[in-house]
Image: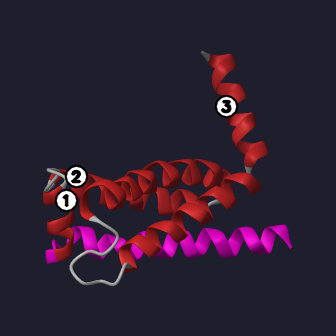
Amino acid sequence: MKEKLSIILRWITALILIQMLFFKFSGIAESIYVFTAMNMEPWGRIGTGMAELVIAIFLIFRKTVWLGAVGGLAVISGALHAHFKVIGLEVMGDNGLLFGLAVIVFVCCTLILWIYRKDARKAFKSIQKAG
């Protein structure tokens, strides 16, 4: 059961992030609006897209799932912060779709990290020993 839930959460998150690549890399009006409002256009948009691509790949492969979840939480926390503080919950008449997708990614990454918490702890401990 836990493995099936994990796979579903990982694929939901990865597919949302991959779908958002078009949003970021094509330079559609909404994307440019969002990153201009944060004074991050175009490099923030492109950099965020590249980070989301790497995160989506990490989520697909079992050995890097925990790292994808941590990265996903980091990136999506920035997106949620932008929604709350800069651009608002609704962007250019999207009825909150971008915000809703960000919330879904945040919840999925949190649950994924909980499921793979032992892998994350083990990785952090080995990093501590190496340092």
* Residue at the spot of label 2: 44
Q: Secondary structure at mark 1?
A: helix
Mark 2 nearby-residue class (10 Å; few <14, some 14–19, many ≥20): some
Apparent side of residue 114 relative to residue 21 in the rendered image (left or right) = right
SS label for mark 2: helix
> Which comes before the other along the chain, label 2 or label 1?
1
Residue position for label 3 = 124
| Residue range highlighted in magenta | 1-29
* Distance CA(mark 2)–CA(mark 1): 7 Å
Q: Residue at x 69, y 18 (%)?
A: 129
Q: Which residue is mark 1?
A: 35
Select label 1 or label 3 by which is in front.
1
Q: Nearer the viewer, residue 1 or 74?
A: 74
- The amino acid sitting under disc 1 is Phe
Q: Nearer the viewer, residue 24 or 77?
A: 77
| Mark 2 → mark 3, Cα distance in angstroms | 28 Å
Residue 124, percent from left and from top: 67, 31
Residue 58's image quarter?
Answer: bottom right
Left or right side of 116 for 21: left
> Quarter-wise, where is residue 82 in the image?
bottom left
Magenta run includes residue 63 = no
Mark 3 residue type: Phe
Considering the image in quadrants, where does the C terminus appear?
top right
**Residue contact at pointers 2 and 1, CB within 8 angstroms:** yes
- How many residues crowd around disc 1 within 10 Å: few (fewer than 14), some, or many (20 or more)? some
Camera-near label (2 vs 1) is: 1
